[in-house]
Image (cartoon, rainbow, N blue to C red):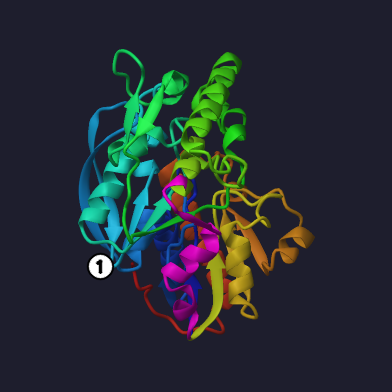
Amino acid sequence: MRVLVAPDKFKGSLSAREVAEAVGAGLAAAGITASLLPVADGGDGSVDAALCAGFTAHPVRVHGADGRLRDSVFAFDGTTAVVEVANTCGLSTLDELAPMTASSHGFGEAVAVAVAAGAGRVVLCLGGSAGTDGGAGMLSALGARFDFGGPRLSPAGGTLSRIAAISALPDLGDVELVVATDVATPLLDAAAVFGPQKGATPDQVGELEAGLAHFARLLSDGSPSLADEPGTGAAGGLGFACRRLGARRVAGAEFFLDLLGFDRALEGCAAVITGEGRLDGQTSAGKLPAVVAARAAPLPVYAIVGQSPLTEGEQHRLGLRHVLAIADLSDTDPSRDAALSRRLCEEAGKLLGRKFSSTFPQDRPRSC
């Protein structure tokens, strides 16, 4: 008998892999066998979760959000490639916020390399973006040409309104494109909803909104606009450009549980431990802990999280038997302290392990 440890990342402190390994170590110290399956929902950390599940790392050199070359990686299993905004041109690639100039070009470069490598399906993971360029940078990297009616400019949030025409839109042939996200924001709300998080002032939000509206008109090509579709505003409008290329949008958490083999990993397990950085009122809206709990039923599901303001009743309505918040195990805030978070996750694993110790035999966790 085993416990499956299937957490998402603790954003800002630990990757899903690090959380799983720390919890697994705590369980082992309490005499509990654990299988580790770091999971993701299509946001940042999705590539790492795919690598843990057996995908192969493919290095790629791309332009970050500020245009500087950087080394990144996508995950590939010979058929499906998992490509991520966060590790190509996301906020983490910037030294300082750049709401008007940050570009999605590097994401497009990684997609192009994945297609050239023979991917029949490319999963487009849009979390952690740095800009609001509507996906213009990605389209440029894939071969689209932008006419600015004067001096050549780089497509970015601050230059969208100056685009006079767009030609040579990319055609990726028979490659299946999948946008895995739970973001439902439409394109023209992207600047107001996400722009301030990326450093945009109120005036800049207005400029970005005008640019996205102009960009949407240029790409409508006489057909009904996609701009009102839920999810087209994901990653500063990258969801819109992905849909323009024919991508289909899927529920991120459900899709990734399937992709990473969650149901197979459940076999022979007597309980599941999941988690993420914070449980709150949004968790029921497709967030991983709630989806894991629903998929694992009727097995008991426990959660180790960074923080949780939810009542015990609210936790139970999510399908969680018990929740341990590591912030409650320390007088120091662990949210930005990776070493402390790791120690507390291990301690939380021990605490849950003691609950299980009379039921499960001792063994070491199988690392990803």
- Residue at 24 percent of width and 57 percent of height: 57
Number of numbered discs on residues: 1
Vertical relation: 210 (above or below) 71: above
Q: Secondary structure at mark 1?
A: loop
Q: Position of residue 158 (x, y in %)?
A: 45, 20
In the image: residue 43, left or right of residue 167: right
The stretch of residues the image draws in magenta is: 244-267
- Residue at 33 percent of width and 49 percent of height: 171
Residue 256 drawn in magenta: yes
The residue carrying pointer 1 sits among few (fewer than 14), some (14 to 19) or many (20 or more) residues within 10 Å by Cα, namely few
Let me know if residue 29 appears in the view.
no
Vertical relation: 255 (above or below) 305: below
In the image: residue 11, left or right of residue 183: left
Q: Position of residue 272 (x, y in %)?
A: 55, 73
Question: Which amino acid type corresponds to the residue marked 1 in the rendered image?
Answer: Gly
Q: Position of residue 174 (x, y in %)?
A: 33, 61
Q: Position of residue 199 (x, y in %)?
A: 51, 23
